Image (cartoon, rainbow, N blue to C red):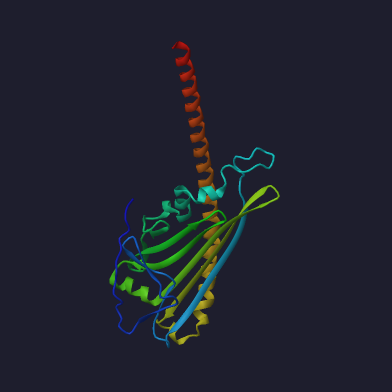
Amino acid sequence: MAAAKYHSATPPFPRYKEIFTSTTRRSIGGYRVNVCKAKLSESNAKKANLSARKKERIRVPNYGDDGTGGKNIHHISEFLGHPCGIESILNTRALQSYQSLDSNVYRCTLPQLQLLSFEVAPVLDLRVTPSTEDCVVEMLSCKFEGSEVVERQNERFSASMRNCITWETIGTEPFLKVDVKLDLVLEIYTQPFIFLPISSVEVPGNIVMQALVDRLVPLLIQQLLQDYEEWVRKQQDLFSMKLQSKFLYLITCQFSHRNS
């Protein structure tokens, strides 16, 4: 897999400082990952707080059920704990590249975007924590890579995201629940916004973010279920191949025993 190019930039403006909500820093696979970090400038700077949240619940096919309410032999929790499930959650097909920093932390580089006259490559560090009860995706860091001007903007915002995927059975019907929450803090430093109320940025910003989340979450769920179905078919084919191989082995042994 292609490795995401990583730039470690020194903050370009001496007057800026980093204030940590948690001072925890961890070294993962030789990389420094800051957890719960908020990059903030001087206290008198204007900051806009944007947020969006989307909850969805959708029925999941009960693959492997015998029709009498028996146990699903290919439960979605098994899929989400499998490497194929992790790749589906990260949506790796839409990424420029991604790499594993630790057993459950991944650096994901999105395709470059054209922003005005600049090329910007968003880079996310995501932690995926699957269990028998849920699967949680957390964004540990978010930054932009590109020119020096682009990378300076990393000092003017902070972002956090949490996607909690849970499952439940109502009667005999299995359901998947997805709860995505996205928060963004932007420093307001350009004209004319520095002369306007913070609400002039927060109100339209929240509308845009909510529209984006409302659009993306159903698409991600749809892709996840398609990948789940494909994975189940592969598991069933593999199981059939193993049964056939075992049957042929038993027949061969029996035939050899009769001829001996």
Above or below for 108 versus 13:
above
Quarter of the image for residue 147 reads bottom left
Q: How many marks?
A: 0
Would residue 106 appear left or right of 218 to someone viewing this image? left
Would residue 221 appear left or right of 111 to someone viewing this image? right
Asked if one can make out residue 109 in the rendered structure from this viewpoint, the answer is no
Q: At 43% from the left edge and 57% from the top edge, which residue is drawn? A: 104
Above or below for 184 versus 221:
below
Would residue 38 appear left or right of 52 to someone viewing this image? left
Q: Nearer the viewer, residue 190 or 65?
A: 65
- Position of the C terminus, as image quadrant, is top left
Task: Determine the residue located farthest toward the top in the rendered image.
Answer: 259
Above or below for 248 versus 173:
above
Query: Could you say where residue 245 lies in the image, as x and y percent from the top left?
Result: 47, 27
Q: At 48% from the left edge and 31% from the top edge, which residue is drawn? A: 242
Query: Could you say where residue 217 lies in the image, as x and y percent from the top left?
Result: 54, 59
Query: Could you say where residue 9 lies in the image, as x and y percent from the top left?
Result: 29, 71
Q: At 44% from the left edge and 61% from the top edge, which residue is drawn? A: 127
Q: At 48% from the left edge and 54% from the top edge, which residue is drawn? A: 89
Above or below for 111 versus 146:
above
Q: Nearer the viewer, residue 53 or 177?
A: 177
Quarter of the image for residue 32 reads bottom left
